[in-house]
Amino acid sequence: MNDTTVKLCVRVGWLTASAYAGMFGFGVVMALLGAVLPLLSTRLHFDLSQAGNLFLAMNAAMLATTLALGPCLDRFGHKWPLASAPLFVSGALALIANVSRFEGLVPAVILLGIGGGALNQTTNTLVADLYEGAHKKSVALNLLGVFFGFGALFVPFTIGALVRTLGFASILYLAAGVSLLPTAMSLALSFPLPRQSGEVPLSTILRLVRQPLVLIFSFLLFFESGNEFILGGYISTYLTRHLGTTVSTASYLLAGYWGALMFARIVLSWTVLRKGGEKLILGSALGVAAAIALMLAAPSVPLAGLAILLAGFSIATIFPTVLGMAGAAYAGHAGTVFGILIGIGLTGGMTLPWLTGKLSERYGIGSGLLIVIANALGVFALQLCAGRTLKRSSTNEA
C-alpha cells in the first residue's frame, strides 16, 4: 500500500467519522420528542392531538430542508451543511430546556427539523459518495445508522437514568453540547469535490422523479419513515398511558428499542446484507408488523417490552438498505435522488404521526398504533415491486 493510498484511506476514515458524528445528532433529533413528551405534556398540559401537531411542524421543516438541500449537495458539496446543521439542533435543545408554554415548543421543533433534515441528508449522501457499489454502500449506510442508534439511545437513556439527579434541563444542555461535535470536525477536514460541476438542471430533477424505481423507493420510504417517527414518538406514551408504567420505565424501554435497532444494524450489515438487501427488507417489514401486533396484544409490560425490542430489531435496516440500493443505481446524482427519496419519506414522517395523534386522541393510542402495521405491509408490497423493477432493468441492460 503506497503513501497515496494510505492518505486516501485516512481521509475517507475521518470523513466517515464526521458523518457518524452528524448521524448521532440526527438520532438525538429523532428520539427527542418521543422521550420528552411524557414530561413536557404533564408540565405544559397538552394532549396527544397537540403532540401530533409538534411532529407535523418538525417534519415540515425537515421536509423543506431536505428538498432544498439535495441538489445543493451535488453542486456545492457536503462541508458547510454538515458544519452548520448542528447549530440548529443545539439551539433547539436549549430552547426546549427553558420552555414554559406549549407555544414555545413550536419554534424549537422547527429548528430541530431544519438541523435534523440537513444532518440526515448530508451524512447519508456523504457516505454514499465515499463508497462504491450497492453492497458497500448498503453496508456503510447501515453502519452509519448505528450512530443514529447511539444518538437516539442517548436522550431516553439519560432521562431514565439521570433525570432525578441531573434534571431535565441539564440533560438537554448536555445533548446540545455533544451535538456540536460534527461542526468542529467538519471545519477541520477537507471534503470531496462536488459530483456535479454545474447547477443541476430542473429537467434532470424532473426526469429522476419520474423514474419508476425512484418512485417505488420514495413511497416505500414514505411508509417506513412514518413508522420510524410513530414508534420513536409514541412508544413511551403508549407505555405510560395504556400500560401504566412510570416515565423512567418507559424511557428505559424506549432506549431498548433504539438499542435493538443499533444492534441489528451492526449484525445484519455484515451477515444478511452479504446475500442481498431485498429479502432483508421483506423480512424486516413482516417483523415490524408482527412485533407491533404483539405489543398491542401484550397484557403485561415485560411482554410489551419484548415486542418493542423486536420492533427495533426489525425496522433497523430498511431505510439505509433502500438508500444503498438507490445510491448505487443513481451514483452520479446521489444527492438529488436522496433528496427526493428522503423528502417523500419525510412526508410520511410528517403526516402519519400527526394522523396517529388524531386517531389516538379520539379512539385510544392502541387504535392509533394500528397504522404501523398497515405501513409495514405497504413497505413489504412496494419492495416486491422494487425487486421486479430491478430485475427488468438488469434484463434490459443485458
Image (cartoon, rainbow, N blue to C red):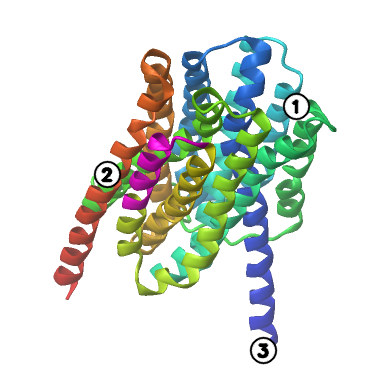
Disc 1 to disc 2, C-alpha distance: 39 Å
Q: Which residue is identified by label 3?
A: 2
Disc 2 to disc 3, C-alpha distance: 50 Å
**What residue sits 37% from the left and 33% below the top?**
348
Q: Nearer the viewer, mark 1 or mark 2?
A: 2
Q: Which residue is identified by label 2?
A: 377
Classify 254 as above or below 186. above
2 or 3: tag closer to the N-terminus: 3
Task: Report the magenta residues as a range.
Answer: 286-300
Name the residue type under label 1.
Ala
Name the residue type under label 3.
Asn
Name the residue type under label 2.
Leu
Q: Main secondary structure of the magenta part?
A: helix
**Element type where label 3 sits in the image:** loop
* Tag 1 near tag 3, CB within 8 Å: no
Give the number of the disc on residue 94.
1
In the picture, measured across the screen, residue 235 lies left or right of residue 219, that is right
Q: Is residue 331 magenta?
A: no
- Residue 13 spot, x, y in % from top left: 66, 68
Q: Nearer the viewer, mark 1 or mark 3?
A: 1
- Residue 120 spot, x, y in % from top left: 54, 45
Give the number of the disc on residue 204.
none
1 or 3: tag closer to the N-terminus: 3
In the picture, measured across the screen, residue 348 lies left or right of residue 122, that is left
**What residue sits 36% from the left and 52% below the top?**
287
The local crowd at label 1, few if under 14, some if 14 to 19, many if 20 or more residues have their Cα within 10 Å, is: some
